[in-house]
């Protein structure tokens, strides 16, 4: 039992260090890659999604990058990549790439989408997902801002709780927040 606790503590500390630059881990790219592709993404999906039914497909190039493609039904709703950059001394810098959208990036909290797949800002959720997997700890979004408390994300989660499973492209029913569907809202992230 003591050995298991020591092992867990060491895993939690691996890659953490106050002297390391941000997003840099004291692990080789091979180890970072293995940690990122191990296990499932259910915690990330369940805590970050906005109530629509989504599927996350993980792929990539061994020891170089991990790609995530997110769909709802047959429609692509998001994608992001994690690039692993070798750093001197056997360390790895992690670069998170989200596609641009307008003057920002997808799900950055500045654009409105009719049926969002994720709570916003997505980047903070992806950063936490990456860090928690590399550091061997639980995914935790406590303290992360939610830039959509009363908008479509909130409404979709309520539908989910009532047993409905909305998908991108489903009609939006009238509500105090949005009334009828606004034609300026889009489900398309330009993927």
Image: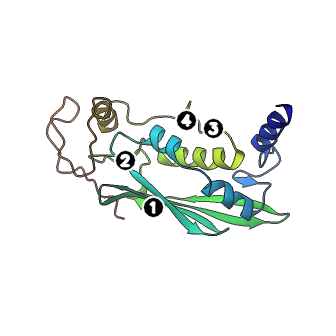
Horizontal side of residue 72 vs 105, given as left or right = left
Q: Nearer the viewer, residue 139 or 112?
A: 139
Q: Which residue is mark 2?
A: 117
Circle 4/circle 1 CB separation < 8 Å: no
Residue 32 location, x and y as percent? 70, 58
Name the colouring of the figure.
rainbow
Name above or below for residue 6 compared with residue 183. Answer: above
Residue at image position (80%, 33%) is 5
Q: Secondary structure at mark 1?
A: loop
Q: Which residue is mark 3?
A: 138
CA separation in Å, label 2 and label 1: 15 Å
Name above or below for residue 180 compared with residue 170. Answer: above
Q: Which residue is mark 4?
A: 141
CA separation in Å, label 3 and label 1: 26 Å
Q: Nearer the viewer, residue 95 or 168?
A: 168
Q: Quadrant of residue 159?
A: top left
Mark with earlier residue (2, 3): 2
Q: Which residue is mark 1?
A: 99
The quadrant of the rendering that contains the C terminus is bottom left
The quadrant of the rendering that contains the N terminus is top right
CA separation in Å, label 3 and label 4: 10 Å
Q: Nearer the viewer, mark 2 or mark 3?
A: 3
């Amino acid at each position: 039992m003591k050995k298991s606790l020591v092992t867990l503590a060491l895993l939690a500390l691996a890659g953490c260090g106050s002297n390391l630059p941000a997003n840099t881990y004291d692990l080789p790219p091979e180890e970072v890659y293995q940690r990122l592709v191990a296990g499932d993404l259910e915690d990330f999906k369940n805590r970050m999604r906005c109530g629509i039914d989504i599927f996350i497909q993980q792929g990539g190039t061994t020891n170089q990058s991990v790609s995530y493609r997110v769909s709802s039904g047959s429609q692509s709703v998001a994608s992001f990549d994690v690039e692993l950059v070798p750093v001197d001394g056997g360390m790895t810098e992690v670069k998170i790439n989200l596609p641009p959208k307008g003057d920002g990036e997808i799900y950055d909290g500045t654009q409105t989408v009719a049926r969002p797949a994720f709570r916003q800002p997505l980047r903070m959720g992806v950063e936490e997902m990456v860090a928690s997997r590399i550091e061997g700890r639980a995914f935790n979004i406590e303290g992360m801002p939610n830039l959509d408390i009363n908008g479509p994300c909130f409404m979709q989660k309520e539908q989910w709780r009532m047993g409905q499973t909305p998908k991108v492209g489903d009609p939006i029913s009238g509500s105090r927040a949005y009334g009828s569907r606004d034609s300026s809202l889009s489900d398309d992230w330009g993927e």
